Image: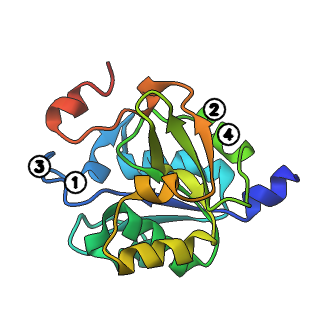
Amino acid sequence: MDTESVFNKLNGIVFTGGLSKRMGFPKALLLYNDKPLYKHTASLLLPFVENIYFSHKKESCTLPEDEKMIIYDVYPDAGPMGGILTALEHLKSPVLSLPCDTPRIDHEILTALVQSRDIKNICTVFYDPFQKRYEPLIGIWEISAINILTEAIDQNQFSLQKILESNHVNKIPVPDFSKFKNFNTPEDWDSVND
């Protein structure tokens, strides 16, 4: 498959977090290597996508970005599934997604993800075989996922794990568990640079 054409078909989505209640401060605005986390995350996606957008709920943090680059979640009660579906419907293109609260994800991991992409599946995501869990927000979601996600939300079923278990998914082994660690509290954040 022509790698260049695969890259050009992707838009990037940075999930900037929910209300950050446990953190007590919007995670997206925390500084990491002297940059707000949402900008650090966007810089990781930049080599792989045509455009980058920021996804969050209306009532969460305000980002100092062009309003055209913000995608407000239209399924606010559906959790991360709602954010993915909103992005797919809004952009009408496959998306490479990354949450802002996994700052140790790096270029090598994203390269492995993009090179493993299989457009015949609804998504390409990392999978932890020990915990038997997917990493649904670090992935490539195809347009074919729209109907499946819509049906799940219509039935008030919001588990991405169940969606991924019961559909055609290209799962990639997690290459380095330490790089997938996310954080939700000030104590977690203190350990990010450990």
Number of residues whose C-alpha sits closer than 10 Å to that of mark 4, classed few (under 14), some (14–19) or many (20 or more)? few
Instruction: Determine the CA span between mark 3 and mark 2.
Output: 32 Å
The residue indicated by pointer 4 is 111
The answer to whether mark 3 and mark 1 are in CB contact below 8 A is no
Number of residues whose C-alpha sits closer than 10 Å to that of mark 3, classed few (under 14), some (14–19) or many (20 or more)? few
The answer to whether mark 4 and mark 1 are in CB contact below 8 A is no
The residue indicated by pointer 2 is 108
Disc 4 is placed on an element classified as helix
Q: Is residue 74 above or below residue 128?
A: below
Please give left or right for residue 147 compared with residue 133 in the image: right
Please give left or right for residue 101 compared with residue 7 in the image: left
Number of residues whose C-alpha sits closer than 10 Å to that of mark 2, classed few (under 14), some (14–19) or many (20 or more)? few
The residue indicated by pointer 3 is 24
Instruction: Determine the CA span between mark 4 and mark 1.
Output: 28 Å
The answer to whether mark 4 and mark 2 are in CB contact below 8 A is yes
Please give left or right for residue 59 compared with residue 178 in the image: left
Q: Earlier in the sequence, mark 3 or mark 2?
A: 3
- Residue drawn at (33%, 38%), measured in percent from left and top? 182
Three-letter residue code for mark 3: Gly
Three-letter residue code for mark 2: Glu
Instruction: Determine the CA span between mark 2 and mark 1.
Output: 27 Å
Q: Earlier in the sequence, mark 4 or mark 1?
A: 1
- Residue drawn at (55%, 75%), measured in percent from left and top? 146
Q: Earlier in the sequence, mark 2 or mark 1?
A: 1
Instruction: Determine the CA span between mark 3 and mark 1.
Output: 7 Å
Number of residues whose C-alpha sits closer than 10 Å to that of mark 1, classed few (under 14), some (14–19) or many (20 or more)? some
Disc 1 is placed on an element classified as loop
Disc 3 is placed on an element classified as loop
